């Protein structure tokens, strides 16, 4: 999960901010690279510093420990991915960027295995469900004309949580079985159950 590949562009207003972003990206990338090579518990802060070329004092300016670095890196990725449809103003009836998520995750399948082996997969999934539930609820609000007016907000919130959980279950199934379907097929499969779950039958192709 390369932070450089998922970060949204930063405004070039303050050089110090650019340096901070580069430092955080270097540390995050170094940790992810190391997680491909050894168990998470075997990685030390010094390993990360040596790989990233960052001083110890600089590291502790930004993070408490390697766990703090790991969770921060994960949250940056999830923030970028979960809300990308809203951020980019997509006009389709999709409520989650399933195609994009699966395509990206498919590239770091070894990291998924490292998360499982290290016991960090639970942290990732908990964060993931929270981010995608909020993003899906936001998409429902943006697509208000497509939602039944009698559906109260509390139902939309509950449905968003349910769909976020279903998305993660689908992602785990897909990875465990060696990614048998394309990200595009998984996107359409997921979205076939979205609008019927809130009482709306859509007769459009969801990915367009």
Image (cartoon, rainbow, N blue to C red):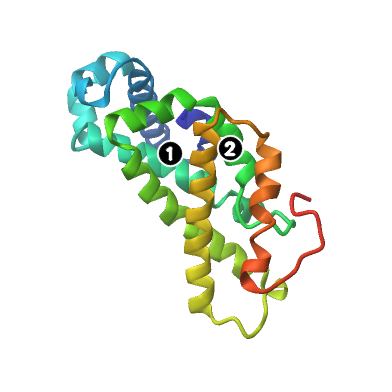
**In the image: residue 60, left or right of residue 118:** left
The foreground one among 116 and 89 is: 116
Classify mark 1: helix, strand or loop. loop
Q: CA distance from mark 2 to mark 1?
A: 34 Å
Q: Is residue 191 above or below residue 181?
A: below
Task: Check whether the beta carbons of the residues at disc 2 and disc 1 lie within 8 A of each other.
Answer: no
Q: Is residue 199 above or below residue 32?
A: below
Residue position marked by numbered label 2 in the rendering: 102
Q: Residue at 28% of width from left, 30% of height from top?
A: 118
Classify mark 2: helix, strand or loop. helix
Q: Position of residue 92 (x, y in %)?
A: 74, 56
Q: Residue at 75% of width from left, 69% of height from top?
A: 201
Q: Position of residue 172 (x, y in %)?
A: 48, 40
Q: Position of residue 71 (x, y in %)?
A: 32, 40
Q: Residue at 63% of width from left, 57% of height from top?
A: 95
Q: Position of residue 190 (x, y in %)?
A: 63, 51
Quadrant location of residue 28?
top left
| Visible residue check, residue 10 | no
Q: Is residue 111 above or below residue 47?
A: below
Few, some or many residues within 10 Å of mark 1 (<14, 14–19, 20+): few
Quadrant location of residue 130?
bottom left
Residue position marked by numbered label 1 in the rendering: 14
Q: Residue at 56% of width from left, 64% of height from top?
A: 138
């Amino acid at each position: 999960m390369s932070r450089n590949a998922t970060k949204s562009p930063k405004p070039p207003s303050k050089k110090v901010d650019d340096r901070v972003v580069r430092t955080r990206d270097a540390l995050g990338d170094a940790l992810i690279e190391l997680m491909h090579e050894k168990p998470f518990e075997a990685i030390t802060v010094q390993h990360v510093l040596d790989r990233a070329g960052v001083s110890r004092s600089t590291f502790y300016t930004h993070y408490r420990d390697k766990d703090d670095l790991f969770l921060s890196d994960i949250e940056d990725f999830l923030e970028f991915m979960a809300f990308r449809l809203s951020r980019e103003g997509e006009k389709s009836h999709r409520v989650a960027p399933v195609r994009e998520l699966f395509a990206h995750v498919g590239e770091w399948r070894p990291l998924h295995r490292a998360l499982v082996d290290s016991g960090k997969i639970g942290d990732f999934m908990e964060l993931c469900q929270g981010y995608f539930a909020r993003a899906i609820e936001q998409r429902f609000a943006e697509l208000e004309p497509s939602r039944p007016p009698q559906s109260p907000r509390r139902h939309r919130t509950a449905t968003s949580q349910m769909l976020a959980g279903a998305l993660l279950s689908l992602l785990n199934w897909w990875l465990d079985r060696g990614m048998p379907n394309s990200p595009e097929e998984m996107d359409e499969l997921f979205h076939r159950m979205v609008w019927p779950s809130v009482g709306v039958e859509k007769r459009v192709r969801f990915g367009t």
